Amino acid sequence: MPIPTLKNRLIAAYLIGSAITTALAIWFVAIRLGDLFMAQLDHSLTDKMRIVRSACVQRDGRVIVELGPDLFRRMHDPEDPEFIQLSLAGGGGVLLRSPSLAGVTLERVGADSAEPSLETILLPGGEKGRAAGQFFYPIQGENAGEPIRLHLIAAHHTDRVHAATRSIVILSFQAAALSMLTLTFLIRLMVRRNLRFLSVLSRQIGETCVESRGRKFSLPDAPREVVPVLNRLNELMTRIDKVLHNERQFTANAAHELRTPLAGIRNRVELALSRPRSNEDYEDALADVLHIEDWLEKLVQSLLILARLEAGTQRIDYEPLPIKDLIRRSWKPYFERAEEADIEVELVCDPVFEPPRPLPIELLEIVCRNLFDNALSYTESGGWIGVTVRESERDLTIEVRNAPITADSKMPIDEVFLPFTRGAQSRTPCERHSGIGLALCRRIVQSLNGKISAIRPNEDTFIARARVPIAYERELGEDEEETAEVSAGPPEES
């Protein structure tokens, strides 16, 4: 089951790490203490052997142990007895044996060396013990004769050493457990105190609602590591406020735009039904209604495309088509309008690629038609419109110039791409322009990873320029690989 809160996770992680570290430290100390206790036991056995060796004297051809029974008994602790055995090296009789052996002979331990040999053996009772053994020659006295080789063993139980080590380990774990409990309380208190800012931030977020525009989160006592997160959160709130404001404005403008043509349709129908009229009058009314409906249908279609682009659900299909054909097909619906307004139109297309490159034809046609419609709608009668198309290896640039522009189109240049932005404030039910064309162009170009801009070099000229990438990185990479293979060529034969 996962730990639900960050505070508990931090405490659990710290305590688990501390427990593992403490257990390793106690294990290391226990090993070192066991080795130290065993070294002290070995040193004690060696001292006892040294006392017994110093008491062994060879006189008149026999070995005499100058260690009285009382002194030998005082060397032994009845509660913690030691096992000492002195015997002839050749397998002869035992010269000296501690009372704890009770007639039992210890196994042979030792070697001919200056220092005793230390080993772990089984004592007569079956317990494990530590034994020190050595072969030596006694001190030579008067008439000693041929030296007699002796074997001395001193052994002791290791139970008390292991018991002492276990006691220390148990005490260490008990102290560690008490320390962990104390640490748990202190750490929980400190973590709760230092994470208090999260509760404050959570409360501020919970109190924020849609109507709380311009709300900023502030944590005066927050640690330095939280400041970037707090700044990003405030930036997110700013973007959300902007999105909500744009959505509300877009909804209000869309409702206003749809209401205008609907009101026009209603007026035409009411006017036609107000009194009996001739067939010609009814036909004129129906033609006006059809004209308004056509404009309304285009507006709704533009809104749907814009919504799909914003949601990322608009499908983009690529198909090869010469760019000249695309421009001519897009301009065709506006030819008669240009003729009626006596506007001169110049179409210039640079040399293009053959065969034609795959292009997002449907979306580019929408961009071209909206740019042409915008230029026609805001150009004075007798003016001029120039369309220049340049196609390179990586992108396509479409530039539309119109001059002289109408007075109602001289709005701030940074507002021309906003939805429902028009120079003219007054509206008629039959007006063609809704103010969404350039906004749709910008969103389409952005969805194609391109750029669109607008400039006004002088008071009478307006220029809109759209640049759209038309080459895929995958295709360019494949072309580069093919070029590299061709340039490398087949290996030459020697």
Image: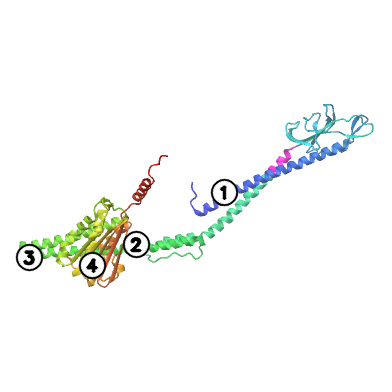
Distance between the alpha carbons at the discs numbered 4 and 1: 74 Å
* Residue 205 rendering spot, x and y as whole percentages: 42, 61
Residue furthest to the right in view is 142
Which residue does the numbered mark 3 point to in the structure image?
275
Residue hosting label 1: 16
Give the residue number, with chain letter if any, for mark 4.
402
Q: In the picture shown, does residue 220 fall above or below 100?
A: below
Label 2 sits on a secondary structure element that is helix
The residue sitting at 18% across, 59% down in the picture is 332
Q: What type is the residue that disc 4 sits on?
A: Asn
Examine the rendered structure and indicate whether residue 371 appears above or below residue 154. Answer: below
Tell me the element at label 1. Answer: helix
Give the alpha-carbon distance from disc 2 to disc 3, as whole Å: 49 Å
The region drawn magenta spans: 157-167
Q: Quote the CA–CA distance across marks 1 and 2.
A: 46 Å
Q: Position of residue 130 (x, y in %)?
A: 75, 36
Q: Are marks 2 and 4 in contact (CB under 8 Å)?
A: no
Label 3 element class: loop
Q: Amino acid at mark 2?
A: Val
Q: On the rendered structure, is 435 left or right of 143?
A: left
Q: Amino acid at mark 3?
A: Arg
Q: CA distance from mark 1 to mark 3?
A: 92 Å
**How many numbered callouts?**
4
Q: Residues within 10 Å of mark 3 (few under 14, many from 20)?
A: few
